[in-house]
């Protein structure tokens, strides 16, 4: 079973590395959105520090959503996905591997590029570390919940916009606690442990339920 | 005597039954809402000393927001029944419920905004309950959007049922995160909500109106279900005989 997981993961990563521009598109989307905000709201340092957590997270939500459509679409078009459904391997395991690949290609780069946000918004080093840690905890949730939406909208016209309509409201807890923790860490008496615990709990819950929900959604879409 | 539990699960048998029930629900809805609003507007004492009459929007507002929540649960219920038993009618019920539910969520938001404008001096405030109603409406909109984007009705039914189930599973998490955005201060943040402080005449008017809204929802959902049945079974013999 874990063998299949590794096989799919390696395959997806290899395919993505053959088309590297797609990874960079998402990454630069994130950076551009983040750097447009100060141009719109002004360069006041205190205000930038205040809005940085929310801006970073919303840009992360949108960036993660950008790549969702491709999660199953290519495999669906060339028929690979149908073959995957026919294999005796548990479908949720295959789905989990694809989610992991999606996170490694879109979530992890955002975590690594977070210091850039910190510099643009005049954040302190400690806050940047907190931001990277919260992104590390939260972005896998985005990939997992997003996969459900991607599976439901598979092969539909205008699927990309539709996914955001379905999935963005479900991202709210990640947004609230992810940016809440960063704001908290800028305070003198801030304690971010509750945020971390809650977000981890949500991560574990989605780890259990989302592969299963995505698998059943895929079966419906390919029926 | 054997009871046929699933007789009315067939759209063909349900269609005439719904037709008979609709007038009944309409009469009940008009009677209950009429009585509730009459009682609420003219038979409640002015408990508020400074005559803040605008509170009377509560009779519509509370009923609509309750319906918004209940209908979501009902929609998920029918979707689940459909997924388990694979009955077409359950999916049609879920689809019909979604539109009325979204309407109720919208009425709750709109009446709340008007009420907020006169009492708080603002159309909108990021109070947890307001935020939650807004999110509830987003969930309805997502459901309707997904359902209408899929041409194959069988796939549309099942996919949107799964979406509503996922939504229901995450709603408690969203609810918690909206009510308590900073977990360090959650102990103090607790919204009391009980009937105890409500004057009995107001309570009576509120509950009767809410019941009337239930009946209205049943009536409109059944009407919409009849339309959906006709649309989907357009090519069957029994429909062409109608």
Image (cartoon, rainbow, N blue to C red):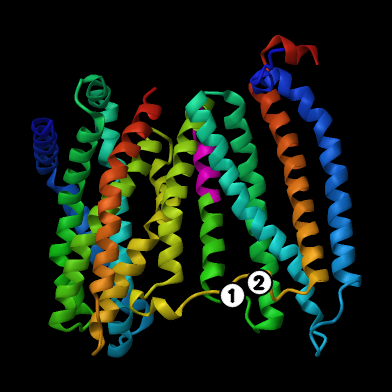
Where does the image place residue B147, in percent across and percent down from the top left?
53, 37
Specify whether residue B24 is painted magenta.
Answer: no
Q: Which mark is residue B113?
A: 2
Image coordinates for residue B111, horizontal then vertical, percent: 70, 67
Task: Give the residue drawn at x 21%, y 40%.
Answer: A96
Residue reaching furthest to the front: B1
Highlighted magenta segment, given as a residue range: B140-151
Position of residue A12 in the picture relative to residue B165 (left or right) = left
Q: Position of residue A172 (x, y in %)?
A: 39, 61
Q: Main secondary structure of the magenta part?
A: helix
Residue B124 is labelled as: 1
Q: Quadrant location of residue A141?
A: bottom left
The first of marks 1 and 2 along the sequence is 2
Q: Nearer the viewer, residue A53 or B98?
A: B98
Residue B148 on the magenta span: yes
Tell me, yes or no, if residue A12 can be seen here. Answer: yes
Query: Mark 1 belongs to which subunit?
Result: B
Q: Chain of mark 2?
A: B
Left or right, residue B131 beside residue A161: right
Residue at 19% from the left image edge and 48% from the top image edge: A22
- Is residue A63 at all visible to an observer of this figure? no
**A78 lies left or right of B72:** left
Q: Nearer the viewer, residue B224 or B240?
A: B224
In the rendered structure, find residue A34 and report the number of the disc placed on it.
none
Confirm or deny contact between disc 1 and disc 2 (CB under 8 A).
Answer: yes
Q: CA distance from mark 1 to mark 2?
A: 6 Å
User: The residue tagged with tag 2: helix, strand or loop?
Assistant: helix
Element marked by disc 1: loop
The answer to which image quadrant residue A28 occupies is: bottom left
């Amino acid at each position: 079973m874990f063998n299949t997981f590794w096989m799919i993961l390696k395959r997806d990563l290899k395919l993505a590395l053959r088309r590297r521009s797609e990874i960079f598109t998402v990454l630069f989307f994130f950076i551009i959105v983040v750097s447009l905000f100060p141009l719109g709201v002004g360069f006041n340092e205190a205000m930038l520090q205040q809005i940085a957590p929310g801006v970073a997270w919303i840009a992360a939500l949108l960036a993660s959503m950008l790549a969702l459509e491709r999660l199953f679409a290519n495999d669906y078009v060339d028929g690979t996905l149908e073959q995957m459904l026919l294999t005796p391997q548990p479908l949720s395991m295959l789905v989990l591997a694809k989610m992991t690949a999606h996170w490694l290609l879109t979530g992890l780069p955002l975590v690594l590029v977070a210091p850039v946000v910190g510099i643009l918004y005049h954040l302190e080093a400690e806050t940047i570390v907190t931001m990277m840690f919260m992104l590390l905890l939260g972005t896998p949730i985005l990939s997992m919940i997003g996969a459900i939406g991607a599976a439901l909208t598979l092969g539909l016209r205008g699927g990309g916009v539709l996914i955001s309509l379905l999935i963005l409201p479900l991202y709210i807890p990640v947004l609230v606690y992810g940016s809440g923790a960063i704001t908290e860490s800028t305070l003198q008496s801030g304690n971010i442990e509750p945020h971390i615990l809650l977000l981890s709990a949500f991560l574990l819950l989605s780890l259990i339920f989302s592969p299963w929900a995505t698998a059943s959604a895929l079966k419906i879409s390919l029926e | 005597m054997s009871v046929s539990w699933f007789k009315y699960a067939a759209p063909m048998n349900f269609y005439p039954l719904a037709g008979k029930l609709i007038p009944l629900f309409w009469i009940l809805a008009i009677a209950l809402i009429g009585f509730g609003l009459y009682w609420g507007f003219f038979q409640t004492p002015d408990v508020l000393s400074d005559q803040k009459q605008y509170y009377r929007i509560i009779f519509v507002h509370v009923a609509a927001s309750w319906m918004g929540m209940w209908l979501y649960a009902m929609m998920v219920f029918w979707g689940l029944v459909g997924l388990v038993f694979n009955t077409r009618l359950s999916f049609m019920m879920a689809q019909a419920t979604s539109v009325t539910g979204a309407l109720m969520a919208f009425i709750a938001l709109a009446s709340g905004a008007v009420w907020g404008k006169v009492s708080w001096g603002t159309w909108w405030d990021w109070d947890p309950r307001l935020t939650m109603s807004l999110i509830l409406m987003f969930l309805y909109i997502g459901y309707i959007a997904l359902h209408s984007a899929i041409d194959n009705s069988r796939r549309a039914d099942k996919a949107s049922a799964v979406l509503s189930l996922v939504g229901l599973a995450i709603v408690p998490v969203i609810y918690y995160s909206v009510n308590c955005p900073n977990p360090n201060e959650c102990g103090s943040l607790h919204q009391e909500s009980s009937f105890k402080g409500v004057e009995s005449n107001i309570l009576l008017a509120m509950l009767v109106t809410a019941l009337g809204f239930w009946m209205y929802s049943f009536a409109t959902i059944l009407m919409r279900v009849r339309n959906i049945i006709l649309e989907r079974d357009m090519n069957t013999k029994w429909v062409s005989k109608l």
